[in-house]
Image (tube, coloured by chain):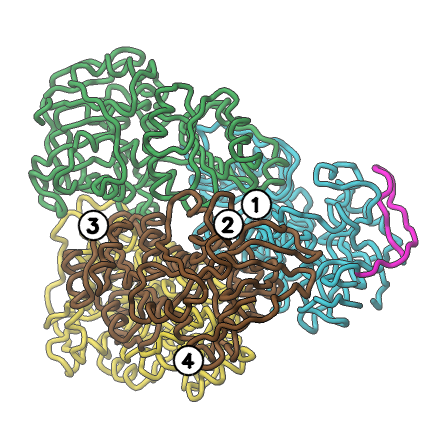
Chain colours: A cyan, B brown, C yellow, D green
């Protein structure tokens, strides 16, 4: 089968041909990959930044995967050949304390598809049954693929602040990219805040308002702009999908009394005098990817038409061009590779 | 091996000899049973009342089991031979939506050890790895056995009302039996209410106060007595471990404005004019057994000395005498059978 | 001033002329009534059923009031003459424990405007400052008036179950009247359930779907119909705005495992075997009117266009005709009286 | 009456004689001060650091006050002359949105007794009724005085993290001073964590274990020590009552995956790379003083014997010596002044 391999850092992925994998354990499932989203984390992996997360070379990238079940092991209970599925990227053991608390992404035996084990920039992939969410009929797996990471990252972060998104509150989304453009929709779906989107690109500001943001502004002077929009009081919730020194500083600077600054993107240093946080009783919280049940819930929302993903599709062969465009900020929403072609 | 079989309703259990079971699946574990608690549900099973729950004759009873791991299948990750364990009685698949929400007892492929499949009134038992909670060193598995059902039933019910057990509130425990005597301790551990225990037996009222109840009273006129204790306002929380027409009526009658009546025991009919509940904004809620994580947390509490179980031990051969004493209300706390003898 | 007085039970209200009231305390406010909603509770009052709630004859009815501030006492801080306001009907002291927990409707010194003290079926009303929610500019106080009781009753009930209204769940609204038609909108706004409305009138079923219900069905055989809609699993949430023996029985009969039956309407007797509730781990909860902050939040939602109220307006002189039409089930949404005429 | 006035920064308080205040408004109450706790915030006030919080010279300090009601205005409902009371230090209006959400300390018209308005280092004080919590009979107001600030600060912070203090978790208290020594007791009362106290003074470590800490260690190398105590996993909860660059850095360094670092003390700068927080999904939260209802709940706990305050008493005339000893770290628990002498 065809696969796109990260063999060396800072080099294009190698398009190779290798035998398709086969289930080794009775709880494993063979999936034909129909769509594989391309994410900024893939860029970080290529830059060599994901070793602390457990990546070792060589590895097939691709952690936003949708596909069709081809074969199942003897102990598999919940899917059968022909089912269309999303692949939840964290591999979890199901028997440790975090797994038993439904926090699969904190599994003590954690692996991550497409980073620490081979992923879906390939025609086929074998995963344990626990990694699969079955799609309801009538949904397009290619369009759904980005939910496997971008969707649940947005959902997990928004769901945690949703109890704060009360009528009368203001929520800010920093960064209208692959994750942020879903978060805007979810803030509307799960909360009742006035939603302000921040992005340097005018085109993305337009996308934000199309998707339900009440206001969309640029990055320069964003903290002051949010103060003005809120009559001086600041934002009750700031969701930061960028994560730089600048966005960390701006995020805290635009925060209201009792406000919550929630980081999804990372990269800079959060630096804040404690007197400011204590006197205003503020929070800074951080988010990982969501849980399996988060992915299941995202699928339910999508199937009801409550959220969409803006996607563009490309053949697997174009993976390096797609990565370049993502690096340049030229992808709106999410690019999805089609390892098995348009027909699937 | 020796086992106590329910072969016919309303008859004594049959003490039989049969081959010890062996693991059939790579995720299964063979456990030598060191202690098996005897519960009122065993009486209901013998009376033929558990068919709606899926029981079919014949079956080996016993759902409060502690033991030692003897052998493990190839895929087992979290225990090894020699480990001492509790057996969480609901068998759960780990891949359905309730399981992925950490609500194992609502598993779509639910079985229950000692009711719908063979249980621990026997020398050995085979269970899936998901059914095991490993005990920290230094704990006595025989004393811990009742936590596998009585302990987590109490914990699950108390944990759900704990956010209501605020300083200044009053909580009532109806029935100081195997479950209730643990619930009293847990109300103290997880909440800050003034705790009133209700039981017709003076000896159990004494046990209640020894275990931390602030007051203990008889069942006759209990609703009036609770009104008096609370200066007329009633109890904010009533946990009913009995469940009869009388306790349902009393439970609602002793409830404060905004109070919660929480049923664990069952049997009667709850009947209440809705105007009474609406005008006082009250709740009536019901509880099943706890989750696997509830059992893990109960073990942590016990290992820290925060709760105890009052137990008496008996050889497996005495199972029918023990069941008779339980039926007569002559067991204080919990009786535990020793299928492999004192030495284990 | 003109006022509609309940002087005798089961008789038409008397249209009387009496001096307008004046503020007696420095924390009181004189309000010119621009709109006063007519509610089923007014019918109950006329029928003599509200004495347990503290009503004594004679009393001016009207507890869904909107108006304009005419004069304020010396200690009033938050409103001034000319402000348009809603009147939160429970009068609360602000210094007892329930008030300090933001549960104004459980105030230890509770009164209720239009039931235990004179209400807004009159040209003017004096209330304490704590009873007022100031309206943002640009809203129509007449259209908003029903929020003062119907709106916050719906909001309070929906907000309590909103954490259960997860993607993939089903919520049922029983009764598409003054309160229910707002609840349907709020379920969509605060939750992600599939929403089913139940009402015997076809016209109200149509209104339900216009307001966002995913399905609307009749009352006959409703429990079976809900089972069918949910592939047998039942509704996770049932909000009952009717409250009869029939709706109580149906509500429990259509409930899913772990489901919540939530009563707002009342009148019948809830009667259910505890084994059914325990084995399915269900809840029956009851709701009073909402808190002041609930009303403030409802106003924010309305001002953002997230909810609407279906209203029809009538002169105060027509109050008895309006009450008759309400009694006959001929009012769609809410009828609002205009004690000071169209112009206000 | 006698009072201790802050007239000039960095100078001893002036012991002056001035007329006792009298109620001016019908909602005001005259209180004879029986005990007034001395707090590190008083030192900050003397150092001129509380101007950002609204302090203007001259002002009578003292914000941890207990006393007896001497006279009440016409509109006062909940206390009468002779009642013993604590004075909740934030003055709140009762009609703004934060007040209506029970968050008195975020009142839009906020004042703070003993900082922005005159406090209790004086024989008498006039406060609005909303500032009073009535003491149950039989409690010693002098011993209770520190609850008015230290007690509710500890309670508010612990209550917010209590849902995380699950069996099996570890909680750290940094700083065993006036607030911290109450927090240790409250962690035990409201949670089930293993509790580790950190303080440089051996005597305070001893106090911590007497009050229920499971372990007490010094400040040097504290992050490593906590890692060791927790077998490498770190603390699930860190409550920092000190607040310096060092404790902020240590607090984050000793934090477990999914851990919460909660600041009460302040002074340094929290500086942390966002990748560390995101990859471990951690939180940094900050706390102000508690709400009125927090103080009421603390009083209930104290009256049940669940918490104590370690106090030493001094005449008001010794205020400057007491402040010096506090500055030197020589006060264990809390020093309380007696403006009306031992007899009250």
What is the span of residues highlighted in magenta in the rendered image? A2-23
State the separation of the CA atoms marked 2 and 1.
9 Å
Q: Is residue A9 magenta?
A: yes
Residue B173 versus residue D316 in the image, above or below: below
Chain under label 4?
B
Q: Are marks 4 and 1 on the same chain?
A: no
**Image position, residue D216 (x, y; %):** 42, 27
Q: For mark 2, what is the residue?
A: A161
State the separation of the CA atoms marked 4 and 1.
65 Å
Q: For mark 1, what is the residue?
A: A239
Q: What secondary structure is found at the residue carrying circle 4?
A: loop
Dot 4 crowding, Cα within 10 Å, few <14, some 14–19, many 20+: few
**Image position, residue B51 (x, y; %):** 47, 80
Q: For mark 4, what is the residue?
A: B11
In which quadrant of the rendered view does residue D136 lie?
A: top left
Chain under label 3?
C
Residue A161 versus residue C299 in the image, above or below: above
Between discs 2 and 1, the one toward the N terminus: 2
Image check: B4 left or right of C299?
right
Q: Are marks 1 and 3 in contact (CB under 8 Å)?
A: no
Front residue (pair A103, D338): A103
Q: Are marks 2 and 1 in contact (CB under 8 Å)?
A: yes
Q: What secondary structure is found at the residue carrying circle 1?
A: strand
Q: Residue at x 33, y 15 (%)?
A: D327
Dot 2 crowding, Cα within 10 Å, few <14, some 14–19, many 20+: many
Label drawn at residue C96: 3
Q: What secondary structure is found at the residue carrying circle 3?
A: loop
Q: Are marks 2 and 4 on the same chain?
A: no
Dot 3 crowding, Cα within 10 Å, few <14, some 14–19, many 20+: many
State the separation of the CA atoms marked 1 and 3.
38 Å
Q: Are marks 1 and 3 on the same chain?
A: no
């Amino acid at each position: 089968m065809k696969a796109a391999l990260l063999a060396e850092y800072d080099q294009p992925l190698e398009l190779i041909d290798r035998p398709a994998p086969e289930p080794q354990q009775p709880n494993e499932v063979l999936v034909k990959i129909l769509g594989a989203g391309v994410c900024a984390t893939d860029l970080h992996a290529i830059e060599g930044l994901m070793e602390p997360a457990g990546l070792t070379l060589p590895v097939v990238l691709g952690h936003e995967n949708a596909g069709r079940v081809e074969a199942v092991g003897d102990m598999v209970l919940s899917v059968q050949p022909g089912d269309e599925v999303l692949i939840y990227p964290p591999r979890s053991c199901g028997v440790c304390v975090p797994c038993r608390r439904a926090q699969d992404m904190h599994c003590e035996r954690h692996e991550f598809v497409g980073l620490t084990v081979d992923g879906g920039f390939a025609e086929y992939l074998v995963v344990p049954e626990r990694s699969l969410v079955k799609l309801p009929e009538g949904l397009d797996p290619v369009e759904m693929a980005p939910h496997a990471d971008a969707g649940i990252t947005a959902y997990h972060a928004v769901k945690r602040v949703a109890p704060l998104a009360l009528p009368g509150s203001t929520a800010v989304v920093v960064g209208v990219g692959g994750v942020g453009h879903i978060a805007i929709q979810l803030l509307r779906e799960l909360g009742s805040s006035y939603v302000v989107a921040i992005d340097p690109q005018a085109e993305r500001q337009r996308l934000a308002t199309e998707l339900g943001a009440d206001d969309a502004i640029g990055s320069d002077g964003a903290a002051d702009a949010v103060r003005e929009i809120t009559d001086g009081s600041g934002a009750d919730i700031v969701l930061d999908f960028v994560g730089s020194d600048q966005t960390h500083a701006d995020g805290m600077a635009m925060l209201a009394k009792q406000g919550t600054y929630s980081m999804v993107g990372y990269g800079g240093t959060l630096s804040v005098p404690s007197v400011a946080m204590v006197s205003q009783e503020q929070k800074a919280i951080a988010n990982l990817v969501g849980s399996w049940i988060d992915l299941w819930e995202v699928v339910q929302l999508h199937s009801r038409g409550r959220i969409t993903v803006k996607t563009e599709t490309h053949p697997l062969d174009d993976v390096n061009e797609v990565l370049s465009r993502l690096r340049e900020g030229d992808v709106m929403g999410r690019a999805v590779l089609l390892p098995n072609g348009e027909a699937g």
